[in-house]
Image (cartoon, grey):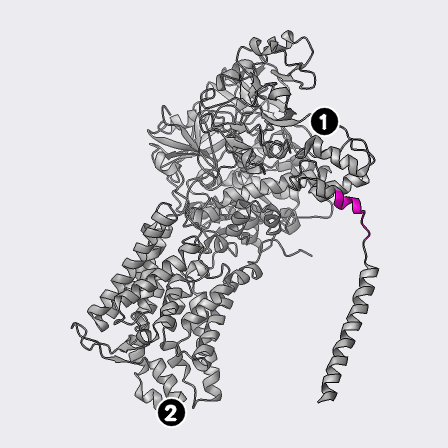
């Protein structure tokens, strides 16, 4: 009796010691030494894994931060300057402050401005509709309105306005991660400087067609008349093919161009509301 | 074009005339000969079970969709009616009405609607209802009225055991299968349905007829029924071959206990069966083997429902392991 | 259970939608020349051609107006004589506005050297290289649908030699009858075209596959083919998508094209019936590809017809000739009902690959409401490529595109069989396309990195 108890105790202890030695050896051999600062940086980051920084997730961004000498190319749009300051502190390097950005939808082809010429029937994803044809209106460059941007947003910051059928960005919720910019098959969404008091001026059209053609399909289209270009004293406006573009780095929000636009394609936004 | 706008959509621009409703109607039609036969055998009581079964299932589905899920009720697709009829087919004719309603509740609410309705249920709803009743009301579920007796009278039915349970009891008490066979209905009677049992399982012939119709309409495919019946036959034949005294012969096994009802109408339920042909064959064979195991070695005389439910649980696994042969994967040397 | 019939077909999947070939017995009709044509400069698979005419130029029918750009491109020709009035963007079958040359008709002049006689010319004078060069100059593309330049398929590839030429006369799409009529009316010309293609490919055998619902065409071609060495007519079971290249090859030869490979990897070259006819006209008659046969069909149409029309003619003109646009038209499709493209307007030019124009009433135009998947497995059973459309749609709906890629979504040929057979009317193909779009985008991003 005692014998068998002793035997099992010894056997089990032996197995335990043996496994312990093996585990120790394996752990030693395959040990990965990681910079402890990566964990520190990751703890500071918001942890939403949105990919807005250009890295697949917060951890890989943290790794990049630790590996980098300065933060010139690294920025977490969700955490913003506050978060980056902490990261810089933790790593003992300089912070590069950036202006807060926000997603801006550059199409004003609302139901009123842009008549529907046909009806799409099928799965509502902009991507496949874009591959199929122009869309429900005559404009090949405007918003399709099926909300790929809405689906891509991890922060619930975009929704389709039920009246205009255009995407509406929520000033408060948008963190400028850029997911919607990538999702839009027509490249209508741009990250622009949020501006003081949410004050921004931009051209809300991407249609490079001739003025008369663009106008026929949408009453709010930029017709490329160049009036705004002439009115701008700061060289912030450039003219593309039948299309004006306002550089937000140069724009001083003087509002001169807004009044000049004959089709009201230039939008002025204050506190997230269009004026 | 005037006022009416053109519709634009992705191809294909046509679709087959078949739809869910037509499939369900086909199943109902295929079940109807056996249903009529059960009314002939068991009379008014059978009609009551069928009507309450269908009515309760349709009612529960409507209520669940309308008031709980708050979606547009889709009882008109006929799937609830099929569940109700199949449930009724699995019940003896003298079962109390309230039990049928409880069974319908379990079938529709618990087994179907909680998973998201038609198409999302992992288990066959009618069988879940039936097994629930079998476990909850064993007495009522395992005694069967004698056919053709008192069928149009409102009196308590004279009940008797089914051939399968007689066989199991008999074998347990040491009677040989040869002796048992002589006391049980002949194969011919079993095939054409002169015997007691659940409403739907009695007439193999009429079930086959319905099955042929479904095959013709391409609602079911041959693989599952063939695999189920074939494997029940082969497996019980093996047992019988090695020990004919204590095992029933294979023909007896396939003709009794709802093998045909299960193989043709339950195992083939689209929602709860595999998607590929190979998967279907594996599914069918496993059901057959499990059925015989439960019948011969288990406590219950009948194993079909359990076997199907057990295999239902394996369907996702089968689907993820068995893939169709893909085009162009062979290399040209 | 599929019936094992003696007639050849591809081994798995497929479906037989109702034929609805209303215009099968209507002879090909040549319409009066339109007053204006808009000729897109991209009508083929490949690089757009470069316009070489200016606004105001006088052009003759058959004159080159846009030059091929590179190997994967063909010339574009003026299809009528007249004056170039516009070189701008025109809405075409792609659903977008694309560069096109518009010509206003004046008179009926042809460029020199075009043989407009009807006499059959069986004597092939050009050699291999000359044929390949000639078909590129004359703007020949596959007329079946994809518009792949003919000369590319004829150009020898190092280390790969076809041993058989397959001519696609399956016309498996419902409604369409243009190839059917062509086989009946231009049989000898088609066979000479096949001989030319055989010469260019240096193969001794050619098989013309025709579906069994075109009995008259099969009988007609078989009778003529006795005079042509090496050409065989094979009856195929009527089953969609028999005319899809991969299925067509497997039906006739039993060979499969490996994933990511070309028909040449299965030692085959496939050309369409109409292409064979166009090759004949180009090589023997010196006539560039400036016209084609188009089926105009639809239940409500007064006069479903087969028209021989010049490329660039407005579809509205064709519909008018077929009895006018019916009341309550809900959808206009370029091509067949299974793979064709719905159009957002009616004034769109016919291009080289336009095989049909279908006019659907309101009722047929809208899709049926989508129900839950009932796992009936029909999409799996009918997919000719052995994919699992229900699974792909499910993954795509949940935005699991990597998994969809693993399930080989990119293999899908978009034949639409899955969506056709689905009893729940689920938009299976829409979602598979969505997955394909995402996968393509991801692959591009990966390649760019």
Residue B291 appears at what percent x and percent y? Answer: 44, 75
- Residue C181: image quadrant is top left
The spot of residue B247 in percent (x, y) is 43, 86
Quarter of the C terminus of chain B within the rendering: bottom right
Q: How far is disc 2 from disc 1 in space, using C-alphas?
A: 91 Å
Find out whether residue A39 is within the magenta segment. yes
Dot 1 corresponds to which residue?
A: A98
Q: Chain of mark 2?
A: B
Q: Which residues are magenta?
A: A33-40
At a point 74% along the width and 33% down the height, the residue shown is: A85
Is residue C138 visible from the viewing direction of this image?
yes
Q: Residues within 10 Å of mark 2 (few under 14, many from 20)?
A: some
The vertical placement of B218 against A262, above or below, is below
Q: Identify the residue at the far front of this view.
A: A2
Residue C193 in picture, x, y percent from top left: 57, 39
Few, some or many C-alpha atoms within 10 Å of disc 1 (few <14, some 14-19, many ≥20)?
few
Q: Quadrant of residue C345?
A: top left
Quadrant of the frame with the N terminus of chain B: top left
Residue highlighted by disc 2: B175
Provide the chain ID for the residue under circle 1. A
Q: Is residue B205 magenta?
A: no
């Amino acid at each position: 009796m005692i014998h068998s108890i002793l035997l099992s105790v010894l056997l089990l202890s032996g197995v335990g010691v043996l496994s312990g030695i093996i585990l120790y050896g394996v752990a030693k051999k395959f040990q990965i030494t990681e910079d402890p600062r990566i964990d520190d940086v990751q703890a500071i980051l918001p942890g939403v894994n949105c990919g807005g920084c250009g890295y697949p997730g917060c951890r890989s961004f943290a790794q990049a931060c630790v590996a980098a000498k300065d933060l010139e190319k690294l920025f977490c749009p969700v955490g913003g300057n506050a978060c980056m300051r902490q990261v810089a502190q933790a790593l003992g390097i300089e912070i590069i402050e950036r202006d807060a950005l926000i997603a801006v939808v550059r199409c004003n082809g609302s139901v009123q401005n842009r008549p529907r010429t046909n009806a799409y029937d099928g799965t509502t994803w902009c991507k496949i509709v874009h591959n199929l044809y122009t869309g429900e209106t005559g404009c090949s460059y405007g918003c399709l309105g099926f909300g790929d941007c809405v689906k891509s947003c991890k922060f619930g910051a975009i929704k389709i306005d039920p009246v205009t059928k255009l995407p509406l960005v929520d000033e408060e919720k948008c963190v400028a991660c850029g997911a919607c910019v990538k999702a839009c098959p027509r490249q209508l969404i741009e990250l622009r400087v949020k501006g003081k008091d949410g004050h921004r001026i931009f051209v809300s059209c991407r249609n490079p067609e001739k003025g008369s053609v663009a106008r026929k399909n949408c009453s709010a289209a930029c017709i490329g008349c160049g009036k705004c270009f002439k009115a701008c004293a700061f060289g912030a406006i450039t003219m593309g093919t039948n299309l004006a573009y306002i550089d937000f780095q140069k724009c001083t929000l003087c509002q001169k161009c807004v009044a000049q636009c004959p089709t009201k394609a230039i939008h002025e936004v204050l506190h997230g509301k269009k004026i | 074009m005037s006022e009416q706008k053109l519709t634009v959509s992705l191809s294909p621009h046509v679709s087959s005339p078949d739809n869910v409703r037509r499939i369900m109607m086909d199943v109902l039609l295929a079940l109807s000969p056996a249903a009529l036969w059960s009314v002939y055998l068991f009379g008014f009581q059978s009609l009551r079970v069928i009507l309450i079964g269908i009515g309760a299932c349709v009612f529960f589905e409507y209520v669940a969709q309308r008031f709980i899920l708050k979606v547009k009720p889709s009882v008109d697709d006929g799937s609830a009616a099929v569940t109700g009829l199949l449930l009724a087919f699995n019940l003896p004719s003298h079962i109390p009405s309230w039990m049928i309603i409880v069974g319908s509740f379990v079938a529709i609410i618990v087994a179907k609607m909680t998973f998201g309705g038609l198409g999302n249920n992992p288990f066959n709803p009618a069988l879940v209802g039936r097994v629930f009743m079998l476990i909850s009301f064993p007495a009522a579920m395992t005694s069967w009225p004698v056919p053709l007796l008192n069928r149009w009278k409102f009196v308590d039915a004279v009940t008797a055991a089914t051939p399968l349970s007689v066989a199991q009891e008999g074998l347990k008490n040491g009677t040989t299968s040869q002796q048992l066979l002589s006391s049980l209905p002949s194969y011919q009677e079993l095939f054409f349905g002169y015997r007691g049992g659940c409403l739907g399982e009695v007439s193999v012939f009429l079930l086959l007829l319905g099955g042929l119709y479904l095959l013709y309409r391409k609602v079911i495919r041959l693989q599952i029924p063939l695999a189920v019946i074939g494997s029940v036959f082969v497996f019980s034949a093996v047992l019988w071959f090695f020990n004919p005294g204590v095992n029933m012969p294979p023909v007896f096994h396939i003709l009794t206990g709802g093998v045909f009802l299960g193989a043709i109408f339950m195992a083939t339920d689209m929602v709860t069966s595999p998607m590929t042909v190979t998967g279907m064959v594996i599914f069918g064979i496993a059901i057959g083997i499990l059925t015989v195991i439960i019948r011969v070695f288990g406590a219950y005389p009948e194993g079909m429902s359990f076997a199907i439910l057990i295999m239902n649980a394996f369907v996702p696994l089968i689907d993820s392991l068995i893939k169709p042969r893909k085009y162009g994967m062979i290399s040209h040397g | 259970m599929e019936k094992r019939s003696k007639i050849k077909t591809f081994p798995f999947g497929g479906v037989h939608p109702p034929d609805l070939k209303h215009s099968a017995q209507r002879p090909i009709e040549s319409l009066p020349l339109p007053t204006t044509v808009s000729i897109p400069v991209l009508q083929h698979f490949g690089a757009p051609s470069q316009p070489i005419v200016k606004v105001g130029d006088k052009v003759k029918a058959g004159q080159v107006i846009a030059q091929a750009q590179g190997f994967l491109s063909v010339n574009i020709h003026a299809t009528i004589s007249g004056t170039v009035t516009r070189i701008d963007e025109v809405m075409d079958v792609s659903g977008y506005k694309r560069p096109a040359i518009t010509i206003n008709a004046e008179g009926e002049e042809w460029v020199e050297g075009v043989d407009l006689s009807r006499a059959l010319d069986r004597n092939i004078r050009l050699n291999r290289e000359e044929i390949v060069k000639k078909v590129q100059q004359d703007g020949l593309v596959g007329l079946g649908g994809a518009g792949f330049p003919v000369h590319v398929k004829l150009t020898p590839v190092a280390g790969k030699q076809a041993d058989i030429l397959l001519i696609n006369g399956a016309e498996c799409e419902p409604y369409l009858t243009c190839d059917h009529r062509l086989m009946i009316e231009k049989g000898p010309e088609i066979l000479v075209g096949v001989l030319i293609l055989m010469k260019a490919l240096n193969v001794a055998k050619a098989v013309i596959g025709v579906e069994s619902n075109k009995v008259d065409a099969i009988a007609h071609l078989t009778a003529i083919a006795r005079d042509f060495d090496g050409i065989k007519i094979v009856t195929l079971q009527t089953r969609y998508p028999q005319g899809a290249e991969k299925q067509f090859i497997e039906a006739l030869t039993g060979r499969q094209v490996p994933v990511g490979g070309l028909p040449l990897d299965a030692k085959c070259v496939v050309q369409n019936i109409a292409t064979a006819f166009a090759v004949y006209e180009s090589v023997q008659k010196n006539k560039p590809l400036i016209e084609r046969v188009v089926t105009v069909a639809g239940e409500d149409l007064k006069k479903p017809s087969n028209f021989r029309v010049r490329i660039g003619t407005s579809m509205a003109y064709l519909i008018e000739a077929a009895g006018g646009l019916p009341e309550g038209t809900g959808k206009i499709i370029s091509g067949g009902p299974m793979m064709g493209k719905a159009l957002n307007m009616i004034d769109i030019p016919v291009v080289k690959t336009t095989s049909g124009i279908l006019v659907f009433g309101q009722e047929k135009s809208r899709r049926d409401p989508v129900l839950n998947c009932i796992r009936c497995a029909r999409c799996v059973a009918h997919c000719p490529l052995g994919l699992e459309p229900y699974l792909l749609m499910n993954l795509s709906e949940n935005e699991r595109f990597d998994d969809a890629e693993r399930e080989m979504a990119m293999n899908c040929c978009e034949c639409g069989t899955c969506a056709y057979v689905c009893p729940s009317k689920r938009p299976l193909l829409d979602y598979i396309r969505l997955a394909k779009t995402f996968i393509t985008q991801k692959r591009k991003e990966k390649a760019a990195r």
